[in-house]
């Protein structure tokens, strides 16, 4: 029944939506080789916990600075051309990872990676939101997220097997995976840019001045109520995720003694849940509303973190990461974010959010490292649950449904 519903949904969507889906699926396949191993690669090149936090923080800082002008440009100029630029830059990230021989050399690479990840995500989400009708938007985000995991059910196991054959988690066993990613991204970029059609967002001939730049951003808050509260909820969520993210796989390997194969199966479990649940959760959100769906699914996040932290054996990490793949946030929050402002403001809005996220999360990885070293390895994860449960969700529960 689920497959039939998804097929019917896809058949009635635009050509642009289908090409964006190809890009998302392709990225999921390619990223499955290295996505879970970047922090371990940084660690293998000599970075300690605070240096891991520093790498993540500096990347977010630069990404935040670039988000404002990029978001403004997205509302005025060619989305298609800007996506091409992002895809070209994206190729250089795994290439620079593969060519590095010391963690210090990763500083420009991590900066580039953070910028690409933030900006490419903004461009993609705007393109995707504009290619979908209002009544289909959450379902569209859900099916995109769901199908993007198909490749991720295969490539993490292949990567883990390759690493096992070459001696486990090490620089030399990880380096070939980055070269594979380079080749895959080049081929995907060619296909997407060849097929993708332009999305016109704003009328041409708008005067471009410094005054118009600031005026355009000020209009976002003047014309849309409740955005300041949403900005707090969004940026604080990113802070909590950034508190944990650099240390997930380090915690799994160094504290829980997970092997490369366990790490591979963790990602497969994550992708399996991401394959099965985003589309039905998206349909639920289209039926009962974004807010109710977020509140209803939020306990899944708490369950995944608690199982991850208190796992009695490494095998339990697979279950934890399966629950981490449940769409308790990404599909629902991304949809809600795009709908907070009118279509013609989405570029500025996503740029502004990315800017605020970048600056509010600069210290998050360093704080996470400090909590780990001072109060124990589980502290960053448990702190994230407490903040979300006691502060963020009570505030979110009081905002009106869109």
Image (cartoon, helix red, strand yellow):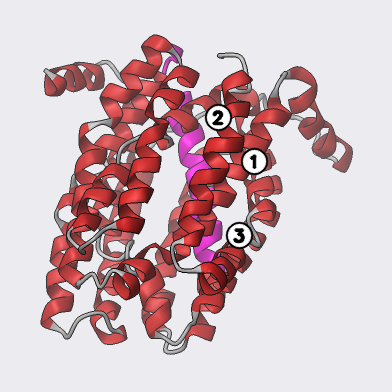
Q: Find disc 2 in the rendering and name its residue.
A: 337
Q: Which quarter of the rendering shows the C terminus?
A: top right
Nearer the observer, 361 or 342: 361
Instruction: Name above or below for residue 336 compared with residue 22.
Output: above
Q: Which residue is found at the position 84% from the left and 32% from the top?
A: 215
- 130 in the magenta segment: yes
Stretch in magenta? 111-135
Disc assigned to residue 109: none
Instruction: Name above or below for residue 94 compared with residue 231.
Output: below
Instruction: Name above or below for residue 252 compared with residue 326.
Output: below
Residue 246 position within the rendered picture, expressed as x and y whole percent measured from the top left: 46, 64
Q: Is residue 81 visible?
A: no
Say which of marks 3 and 2 sits in front.
Answer: 3
Instruction: Name above or below for residue 268 compared with residue 6.
Output: below
Nearer the observer, 96 or 200: 96
Q: Find disc 1 in the rendering and name its residue.
A: 353
Q: Find disc 3 in the rendering and name its residue.
A: 364
State if disc 2 and disc 1 touch (CB < 8 Å): yes
Mark 1 or mark 3: whose residue is earlier in sequence: 1
The answer to which image quadrant residue 175 occupies is bottom left
Q: Is residue 245 left or right of residue 257?
A: right
Q: Is residue 39 visible?
A: yes
Q: Which residue is found at the position 33% from the left and 75% from the top?
A: 254
Measure how far apart labels 3 and 2 are at the Cα level.
22 Å
Residue 9 position within the rendered picture, expressed as x and y whole percent measured from the top left: 25, 18
Q: Is residue 120 left or right of residue 349?
A: left
Q: Which residue is found at the position 40% from the left and 64% from the top?
A: 91
């Amino acid at each position: 029944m689920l497959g039939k519903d998804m097929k019917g949904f896809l058949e009635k969507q635009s050509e642009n939506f289908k090409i964006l889906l190809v890009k998302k699926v392709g990225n999921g396949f390619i990223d499955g080789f290295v996505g879970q191993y970047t922090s371990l690669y940084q660690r293998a090149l000599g970075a300690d916990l605070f240096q891991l936090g520093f790498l993540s923080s500096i990347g977010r800082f630069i990404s935040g600075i670039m988000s404002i002008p990029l978001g403004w440009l997205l509302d005025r100029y060619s989305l298609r051309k800007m996506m091409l630029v992002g895809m070209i830059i994206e190729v250089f990230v795994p290439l620079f990872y593969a060519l590095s021989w010391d963690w210090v050399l990763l500083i420009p690479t991590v900066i580039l990676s953070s910028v690409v990840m933030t900006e490419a995500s903004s461009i993609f989400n705007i393109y995707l939101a504009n290619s979908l009708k209002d009544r289909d938007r959450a379902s569209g985000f859900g099916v995109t997220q769901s199908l993007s995991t198909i490749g991720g059910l295969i490539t993490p196991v292949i990567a883990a097997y390759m690493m096992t054959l070459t001696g486990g988690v090490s620089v030399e066993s990880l380096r070939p995976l980055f070269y594979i990613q380079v080749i895959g991204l080049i081929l995907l970029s060619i296909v997407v840019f060849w097929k993708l059609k332009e999305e016109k967002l704003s009328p041409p001939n708008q005067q471009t001045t410094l005054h118009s730049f600031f005026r355009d951003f000020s209009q976002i808050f003047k014309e849309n109520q409740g955005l300041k509260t949403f900005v707090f909820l969004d940026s604080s969520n990113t802070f909590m995720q950034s508190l944990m993210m650099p240390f997930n796989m380090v915690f799994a390997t160094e504290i829980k003694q997970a092997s490369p194969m366990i790490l591979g199966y963790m990602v497969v479990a994550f992708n399996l849940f991401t394959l099965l649940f985003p589309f039905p959760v998206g349909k639920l959100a289209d039926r009962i509303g974004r807010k109710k769906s977020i509140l209803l699914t939020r306990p899944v996040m708490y369950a995944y973190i608690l199982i991850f932290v208190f796992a009695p054996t490494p095998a339990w990490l697979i279950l934890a990461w399966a629950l981490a793949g449940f769409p308790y946030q990404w599909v629902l929050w991304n949809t809600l974010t795009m709908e907070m402002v009118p279509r013609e403001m989405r570029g500025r809005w996503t740029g502004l959010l990315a800017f605020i996220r970048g600056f509010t999360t600069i210290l998050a990885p360093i704080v996470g490292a400090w909590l780990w070293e001072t109060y124990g390895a589980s502290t960053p994860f448990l702190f994230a649950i407490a903040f979300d449960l006691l502060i963020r969700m009570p505030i979110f529960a009081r905002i009106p449904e869109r």
